[in-house]
Every structure is written in C-alpha cells, then in structure tokens.
Amino acid sequence: MAIHLWGGIETMPEVSIFKQNLSDLLGGKSAKGLEKSFGFVTAGDLLQHFPRRYAERGELTSFEKIEVGKPVTIMATVSSVTSRRMQNKRGWILVVTVTDGRDSMQLTFFNQKWREKELQIGRSGLFAGTVTDYRGTRTLTHPQYLLFADGSDSDMEALNQFAGSIIPVYPSSQSITSWQIASSVDVVLASTSDLVDPIPESVREEFELMDWTQALHAIHQPQSHSDLEAARFRIKFHEAFVLQALLEERRRARRGIKAIARQTKNHGRRSQFDAMLPFVLTDGQIRVGQEIAADLNSESPMMRLLQGDVGSGKTIVALRAMLDVIEAGGQCALLAPTEVLASQHFDSVMKLLRDMASDGSLLTSMNNSADGVHVTLLTGSLPSAARKKALLDIASGTAGIVIGTHALIQDSVEFFDLGLVVIDEQHRFGVEQRAVLMNKGRGDTKPHVLVMTATPIPRTVALTTFGDLDVSTLDESPSMRAGVETHVVNAMTVPNHLERVWERMSEEVKAGNKVFIVCPSISEQMNADDIDSDHAGAPITANQKLRSVDETVEELASRFPDIYFGALHGQMKPELKHDVMYRFTEDAANPVDVLVATTVIEVGVDVPAATMMIIQNAERFGISQLHQLRGRIGRGDRPGLCILVQNNFGNEGSTDRLEAIRSTTNGFELAQRDLEIRREGDVLGQDQSGLSSSLRLLRVVEDSELIELARDQVTSIAESSTWDAVLAAIDATDFERVTHLEKT
Ligand code: ADP
Ligand code: MG
C-alpha cells in the first residue's frame, strides 16, 4: 500500500479485486472457513472456484448415480416426514424422506424435532452431506439444507443469488455448503466490475467473446443457458490464452540466456560415424539430426524434446549430436533414470563407437588416444576410487561423454566445459533436476539440452505443458519392422491357456531366442511392501496376491530344468544387475535364457535377441507402461510375441487397457487412447511446468483446437505494441499462474 506524503491526501493505487483479501471483503468467519477448506485467501481464488455443475430450479437431482461415502449436494423435494421417540435413548428421531421424483433418500435428525416446521411435505431445496447406507437406504444424517421460498412463509431464508432459475452447485467441503460458497461469491461479485482484460478487444471481437468481468458474473450466476455457454467458452479461451502467453514469455526470457555455439561440421566425426553404421539412418533420424545441429550452432541454448516411439532409434540421434559437440570442444552428459539403463547406455555407446572404428579413432575409453572419444560412467554405486577418477576426468575435460544416473546431478560433479545434456526418458525426471544440470555450463553459459521421451505426447498436450520446448518427432521405428503380436490370456478363467504360454516360452528358448517375464513384485508377499519402486502402476489393494520375481523363478526353474532363468529387480546390487543383464544380452559363456524381472526393464533396455515377453498381472499396469515394456521385444529381425496375463476376472478399466494394447502397437494411437481412458487430472499429473494445474475449464485433449487458436493469437500479439498491456492484465487477474511461472 503506497502512501503519498506530499499532497497530504492519501491515495491508494488501485488494487485489483483479484488480489484483495477475502477477510476484508467477507469478514473473518467466512474467509477463515474458505481458507481452511480450500486454501482460498484472495478474491481471485474464490472467483476462479467455478461451479461443478448447475441445477435447474424445478428439476430435481437424479439420485441414481449417488454413491455411499461421497459428499453430495442434491436438489430434492420432501415427500414424507415422521418423528418418533428413540427406542433405547431419550429423545426424538426425525426421519424425512426426500425424492428426486423417482427414487427416494432419507434425511435423519436426532433431537431436532423442531425441523418438522420447516421440512414440510412438498417443500424443495438443496440438501448437502455425506451419504451413508442405513439398512439399505441411502441416508444423510443431519444434512445442511437450504429450502427454496415457496411464497407462503415469509421467514424462510431465500437467497437472492438464486433469483435466476439456474442454480450453481460448487465443489463443497464438510463444513462449507455449496450455497454458502454461492453467497460469498455473490458478495465478491458485487465489487467486481471493469476488470482489466488480458484478451485484447480486437481478439474478443473476432471470436465474439464476453469480456472478463461479464464472464465471471455469468459463470457464477448465469441468467440463461446461452449466457452460461458464452461464459464457459470465454473462460476456456481465457485459460488457453493466458497459458500460451506465459509460455511465450518464458520463451522470450530464454532468449537472454546464452549458450556456447558448437559449430557442427559436415565432414567430421559424425559423418565418419554414419558411414560405419551397419544400417542406414531413417529420414526421420536425419531430419531431427538437422534440427538439432541447427540448434547447436546457435548461441541460445537448445531446449528440444525428442519424442519417438520405443525402438525409433533416439539413442543414435543423441550420439550423433554428442559427436558434433565433442568435436567442437565440448563435453556431453547423458542422464538415465536407472542404473540398469545407464550401464546399458554405456555398453551400447561403447559398442557403437568401437565397432565403428577398429583403428580406435572414435573411441578411447580403453586406449586414451588424443583423438578419440572418452566415455565415462558415473552412477551412485561406483566404488570410491573409480568415482574419484571419473570426477577428475569430468573436471579436467578428459571425459567426452559422461553417462550416469542422478549421481550426475550432485554438486561434486564439475564439468570442464559441458556443451550438451541429453536426458533419456525425461518423464522420470523433475524440472529441478533438469535445472541443476543446466547450471553446470561453463561460466554464465548454459549447455544445450535434449530431452528424449518414448511416451509420445499428443500435440496439444505438448503445446500446453511443454509449450516452451521445441518438439522433434521420430515417427518410424526402424528396429521394430518385424512387429509384435499381442495376446491376452486370462489366468483365472482359462488356466490351461497359461500352460500353453509356458510351453511356448520353452519353444522360444529352444529356437535360440530370449524371453522376458515381467512381474509386478519382487518376492512373494501378500501386500504392496515389496513392489519395486519403479512400479508405477495402479495402487495395490491390501491382500491382493501378485506374481513375484522370486516365486516365478522358483516355479519355472523346477519345471524347466534345461532353461537358465535370471532375476532382475531394483533391490539387487548393481554388480549383480549388470552381470545378469550381460548374460542375457551378450553371447556370454553362461547365458541367461529367460529374464524374470520387475519393471526395471521398462525403459530403454535393448536386447535384439528377445522375441517373447510374458507380463504377469498385466491388469496392474498402465497403457504407456505396457507399451514401453512390450517395446523391449521384436527389436531384432525376428517377430515378437507378447502375452498379457490377466490375473483378475476383469474390470472395466483393466480390460479396456489390455484391449487397447492388444489392438495396436502404434504409440501415438495408444497415447490418445490412454488420454481417453484416463481422467484429465491423471494426464496432467505428468505436467512438469506446473502451469496446467491452474486450468479450471480447459481440457487439453478435448479443447485442442482452442489451444492452437490461442497460441496463434498469442504469437501475433507478442510482436505488437499491446503485448505489455496483456502481460500487465494477466498479472492483475491471474497472478496464480504467474506465480507458477516464477517457480519453474
Ligand atoms: P529408442 O528410441 O527406443 O531409444 P534405440 O535408440 O534404443 O531406440 O534403438 C533401438 C534399436 O534400433 C537399436 O538396436 C539401434 O541400434 C537400432 N536402430 C537405430 N536406428 C536404426 C536404423 N535407422 N535402422 C535400423 N536399426 C536402427
Ligand atoms: Mg532409448
């Protein structure tokens, strides 16, 4: 609050209603209640608490879908009232039956006989409480209620804000009813006029949008259905517009950050490497390579998301970029989410470079020739001497490529000149972790960053949540040409099919192929304690027995004595993990034929000889996880066979998921199906920008066209003189989003 000392008159700068405290507007009691229940502090918080649905006066709420245990707000009519003395205690019990016109529910009051006077047959109103089941009847005990005025009695409290026929129903809490919220909103709306509007007038005219003030009034207190529709559209547009504007700002801010341009060469190491590859690069790999090279040559840091389905060959793309950067004098870091994946990356990078250059010109990890690439592995489990050596090589610049896990992020890791950071399976890392690595650039500069994901993100989700990243897409999977066939086998209903699966496994092994068996848990237990921490599937209900790695190995090893089984899970020592992976992957003297593992193998693991995968308790896994797992097979020239073993009798969600997986191997299609099956909130659960948590009405899948539209508008306005006014208006009315932006 600014006080001007000179004129003697105290003038206050106008504070947007959005930023005013609810306690000043509503008084302490209501404000405290809203803060306690919802965390609302300012008028803006409350104004953006939109009704969940609307009830129409005269139209009762259908009871059909009302569930026991859930808090509800219903509109109903009293159909009977009885009161009697309680049997075992003193006092009265009042039972009121209310109806939706078809079904009925019961309201119970103890020792409140006086309510008979209010709750008369034929009266309608709103009733709120948590539904319980009392001897088969859905019951609200001591519900809060608000009766509509029926014209006969004058003392009834009829709320002014329900003068219209459309009644808002708000997400409410135990202690605050929907209509109490409505009445607070009414008070705040009374002081809400002439808000500055972030959407410029020209855009409002073009798309026939209500202004911001009108829209807020209409969403809370619609006068008609068309009024409500218009308000909803305006607010969705608003959310899309503001989100895109903030992302645009973020992009602009980034322009101020400098990176060191890494001049790429057309006839350097990268082309040498290409020439020696045992396959030709796909068009997509070449195109994305060019996009990355262009970024590397620039003085603003690359921020690129590379999405490509499993097997699309992202690693090669990353490695080619690394060779460019190394040749230009920089170092590269490759961050992987698990130790297994980090050491697999290490092995395959070494192998690729070694096979390529028998003269050692590309690789020097073994022979440190001045010309070659030095590859260093840094994980948490490295013995301290090896770790010391690795840190030294990183700090001195000897290490050209550093591959590691979270251990790379620690303070003690100092690079001589970090030029490129590649983050594999980026959904496993948070924004903060990304930020830490970005601060390891030389001097004030930031390294270029490439994040890779195998979970394809539909375009609008990418626009919304990763709006500030450039996106490259690999849409072919060259290594998966052989294809994978998928079957669902229900172990509960048709156990003999499962027998057939084990026989098939043994046939595969006899044919010289490798087999994965995936289990959701590590050892036999009746609960979720030993679920591998990498398991991100549905929550485990107590006492549900899940197939485990230990149990599976034990059972199958005794049945198939000629087959070598290996176990792999997150709680094993790194040396053991590496050993079993090695024996499964390479032509080892004592090979593992069947790898029984938890989802640690979900990401990135590359075993071309693997042709079959059996996923036990497949109903426990999500679509993208199953897709990732299945992507581990059919990578060589032999077709893959994936068996989803369902160990329940099937419920809607799991059956839909398994059917989706069975019917297609296209990652983009599956991502879309996944979005449809999952709820919106789950989709955005992966959002790393934090921005979309402030979306109220906008749905990133449904409203994709609107999002694109808003983005186009923002892009053209950002170049015009109105841009600053837009930002100022957002700051005045949408500071919650601005705060989110600052946090990231
Ligand atoms: P992902 O995108 O799932 O990380 P990878 O980079 O691990 O895929 O590649 C999967 C397999 O495909 C590897 O064995 C790799 O050598 C191979 N590969 C990559 N590019 C090509 C290509 N253009 N043609 C054939 N095989 C390829
Ligand atoms: Mg990969």
Image (cartoon, rainbow, N blue to C red):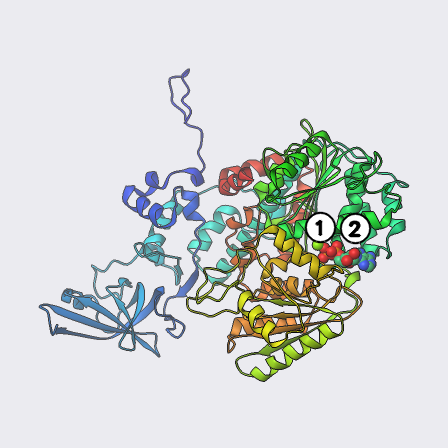
Does label 2 or label 1 sit earlier along the sequence? Answer: 1
Quadrant occupied by the N terminus:
top left
| Residue at which label 1 appears | 345
Residue at x 48%, y 63% (from the top left corner): 539
Classify mark 1: helix, strand or loop: helix
- The crowding category of the residue bearing disc 1, from other C-alpha atoms within 10 Å (few below 14, some 14 to 19, many at least 20), is many
Label 1 beta carbon less than 8 Å to ligand 2: yes
Q: Which of the four quarters of the rendered structure image does ligand 1 lie in?
A: bottom right
The residue closer to the viewer here, 442 or 163, is 442
Left/right of residue 12 with respect to residue 577 in the rendered view: left
- Which residue is pictured at 88% across the width and 50% down the height? 276
Dot 2 crowding, Cα within 10 Å, few <14, some 14–19, many 20+: few
Q: Position of residue 558 (x, y in %)?
A: 59, 74
Instruction: Report the side of 626 relative to 313 (left or right).
Output: left
Report the disc number at residue 351: 2
Residue 175 image offset from top left, x and y in percent: 30, 54
Cα distance between the residues tagged 2 and 1: 10 Å
Q: Which mark is residue 260?
A: none
Looking at this view, is 523 or 193 the one in front?
Answer: 523
Tell me: residue 79, above or below residue 129. Answer: below
Specify the quadrant of the image occupied by residue 716.
top right
- Disc 2 versus disc 1: nearer the observer: 2
